Amino acid sequence: MKILNKQIKKIAISGLSASILLPFAIKSNITVQAAEAPEVDAASALVVDFETNQILLDQNADDQRGIASLTKMLVEYILFQEIEAGNLNWDTEVTISDYAYQVSQNYELSNVPLKKGEVYSLEELYQALAIYSANGATVAIAEQIAGSEPAFVDRMRDLVESWGITDYEIYNSTGLSNASLGDDIYPGSTTEDENVMSAKGIATVASHLLKEYPEVLDTSSIPSKVFREGTEDAIQMKNWNWMLKGLLHERPNVDGLKTGTTPFAGANFTGTSMEDGHRIITVVMGAGDGIKNKNQRFDETDKIMDYGFNEWEAATVMEENTVLEDVDPIMVRNGKKDSVEVMSAESLEYLLPSGIEEEDVTWTFEADKKALNQEGGLEAPVKKGQELGTLTFTYEGEDLGYLDGSEHNKVPVVAAESVDRAGFFSVIGIWFSDFFGGLMERF
């Protein structure tokens, strides 16, 4: 992590009236070309810093697209919620319904063989979902949790809306087209309906899943496992995430998260990896059809992971309690001191694209009009840490913001020290000086 020095050009604010207290920009004339984001051969692509949710790459990431089996990340989240609440455990016995059985028998879809009426452990069904994207197993889990898949869909909808995702369509737990589910579709939906969300929405789901239930990586990182080993139903489950260790597109440190493919959605992949203590989340959607070029989604993910890890650097762009020495102190009226310096109240860490240096940093100070008097100063007494305004950080180049749409580039500016009110006679003297000074200005 680098630390940028804050040499801020001097700004006089003490003599300004409140009516013209506008932001003060300190901007360098130097322009450095930051690393360009790669063109991604996919309909949508997104790279997000896991820790902060800062967006590092955005290619049509607001577009609504079919999400296919990326849907199953929501099933995983709700399953972990139920286990955390003590409502279920990994040994919970799940009886396979006729609907779950029928879905599991369609071997044009990703599935493990399930027997109607037979009991399976919740853990083995979850492993089939997470490793092999097994659709019948997913339905069985949804029914176990909510009693029916439509009831589970209602819970999924409530969940995404609680995260601020309002533009979406969810009709089933698997991400399949309703046409693959026969008569067992969500009430009021049609056979053509399919789950839809944006890359930003999917990244939001992945972010919540990884932050709140990181144990999901224990299973999503398994390259291959035998389902019901030692039984007549044993089947080798090779993870559809081919970037895992030992698979066709192995990339070191990739440990998740979920693929998804339908004719409507095309080939999707939500990936995650940690390098040198830094984790990122990637999303590619519509990276080919997943049939003619089965490698495309992984090739493009590899490309944007390179960009996310190699072309961005963590920087402390402002440290807590930094006195802004090059900013004129704010005048204090009726105080034992006639001015007070200002300082940052918090530190600010930011990921910056390579090529950005301190000369490319722009700070904008906006005073809080309510904190200052009409002359743009303060009235004593002043307390150390008293908020005076906001310092906003920007840099040369495109700032893509954060996944939740919030602003994380602002630092409160406060008084660097306390200033007590002057004694009675000093205040009277200041008053007379101001009064007679005003009279003299009239003549």
Image: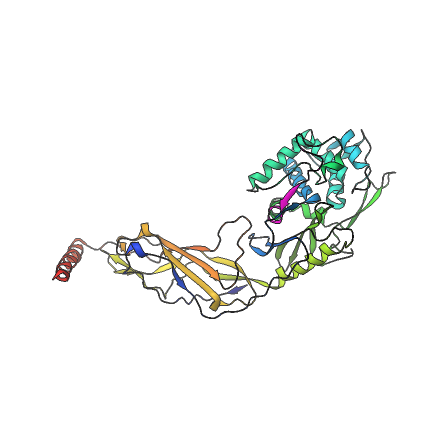
**Along the line of sight, the residue nearer the viewer: 177 or 132:** 177
Where residue 72 appears, as percent x and y from the top left, is 69, 42
Image position of 138 with respect to 248: above or below = above
The outermost residue toward the left is: 443
Does residue 275 show up magenta in the picture?
Answer: no
**Along the line of sight, the residue nearer the viewer: 38 or 377:** 38
- Residue at the image position 82 percent from the left and 40 percent from the top: 107
Q: Which residues are magenta?
A: 188-201
Where residue 75 appears, as percent x and y from the top left, is 67, 39
Where residue 93 appears, as percent x and y from the top left, is 75, 32
- Residue at the image position 35 percent from the left and 57 percent from the top: 22
**Along the line of sight, the residue nearer the viewer: 348 or 62:** 62
Q: In the picture, residue 173 is in which quadrant?
A: top right
Q: Is residue 158 left or right of residue 260?
A: left
Where residue 54 appears, as percent x and y from the top left, is 55, 54
Q: Is residue 85 visible?
A: no
Q: Is residue 300 visible?
A: yes
